Amino acid sequence: MYSDLPTVINAAGTLTRLSAGPLAPGVLEAMAAADRVSLDMCGVQAVASRAIAAATGAEAGMVTSGAAAGLLLSAAAVMAGLNVGRMNSLPQTDGPDEFIMSRGHRNGYDHALRAAGAKLVEVGLPEPLAGSGIRDAEPWEYEVAIGPQTAAIVYVASPQSLPHLQEVVAIARPRGIPVIVDAAAELPPAENLRRFAAAGADLVVFSGGKLLGGPAGTGLLFGRADLIMSAALQSLDMDMHFADWAPPADFIDRTRVRGLPRQGIGRCCKVGKHDVLGLLVALDHFLAEGDAARHARWLSVCERIGAAIDAPEGGAVSVTGAQDTGRVPMVEIRFPDPESARRFNQRLLTRAVPVHLARKGLTPERLYVNPTCLRESEIATLIEALQG
């Protein structure tokens, strides 16, 4: 029935536009098992909360419909808290709605914060990126930006992020300001699942459909129990009488709310039982496999490809990240100039079965083979394309 679907060879990585990453072993089976029964979704998310808390060290968690949904729910949670009236009014706000972010952390995904009603307040200047200086955002800039309308600080995690998260938390915590960490693609290493919460983040967001190996439209949101409770109330189906509502008490304490929201702003971010249970199996597999075995699997693919292809004239081929189990190894193809790389990439994209390679904005003369989405059956075709 779907034999005419256009396929691609994805050597670019777990990009959503290329249908994200392969499912981890056992995920499809878990999704099929979920399909054989009817479940109460609040109870399903309560089970997820316990599993996510155990894996991350956080107080509570939930499965979201992707990392961007996690950001929207995070913003909604800190602005509304457990005030059901505020939940019903979002994105209109009657309380603190300013979210402080470093200018160097701004990206297209912060649209999810603004969709919930957040107003972004920028601090700092990424001067090293612009080649105009040596400083990025500094802790004192967050401090002076805090005012009566500050709802939270948003921190986008990467190995290059400045200032360090601990410095931002040290500013925020004494002032009662929650810190939201966008760590959507910060796996591996597996220790990052615990690192940000341990550093003091109040809410942390990860993608579930990337290297975790869960369904493409899933994500993890975890952190403070009261904020997770608010996020759940604003995304679960709340069309019931309050007297009939009996959520698991360790997930949602019904004594802390006066009623139920009239479907929260996060209702558009709902997930089904298949997604939740599939992601939990993926999370278990990710932790069980471990960084070393996962890295060795990817490195083997890179070494096979790197050894089989010739360097472009005036360029070079190498494998990067071979010694670091905390990053994804890749085959780097370096060209003599950006235009040569662009022409090579365009040729790959116009093949009968397009080949997508990874690119990095600051090194346009380089293309990368990311092994994380390659199937064994595709490797010979990929090598042929790279040689041609």
Image: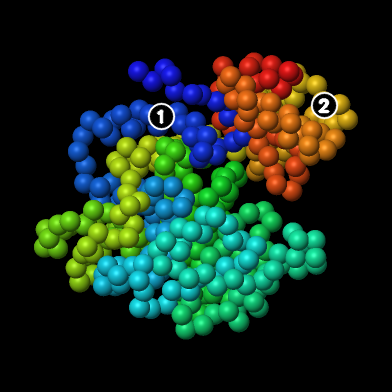
Residue lying furthest right in this view? 314
Would residue 256 be visible to someone looking at this image? Answer: no
Q: Position of residue 127 (x, y in %)?
A: 75, 65
Q: Are marks 1 and 2 in contact (CB under 8 Å)?
A: no
Whether 6 is drawn above or below 192: the answer is above
Q: Residue at x 39, y 71 (%)?
A: 79
Residue lying furthest bottom in this view? 148
Amino acid, disc 2:
Pro
Q: Residue at x 45, y 58 (%)?
A: 112
* Residue bearing the label numbered 1: 26
Whether 144 is drawn above or below 35: the answer is below
Q: Quadrant of the C terminus?
A: top right
Disc marking residue 312: 2
Would residue 354 be visible to someone looking at this image? Answer: yes
Find the distance from the CA under tag 1 to the CA under tag 2.
41 Å
Q: Quadrant of the N terminus?
A: top left
Q: Residue at x 17, y 56 (%)?
A: 239
Is label 2 in a helix, a strand or a loop?
loop
In screen coordinates, is 292 left or right of 182?
Answer: right
Amino acid, disc 1:
Gly
- The answer to which quarter of the image holds residue 10 is top right
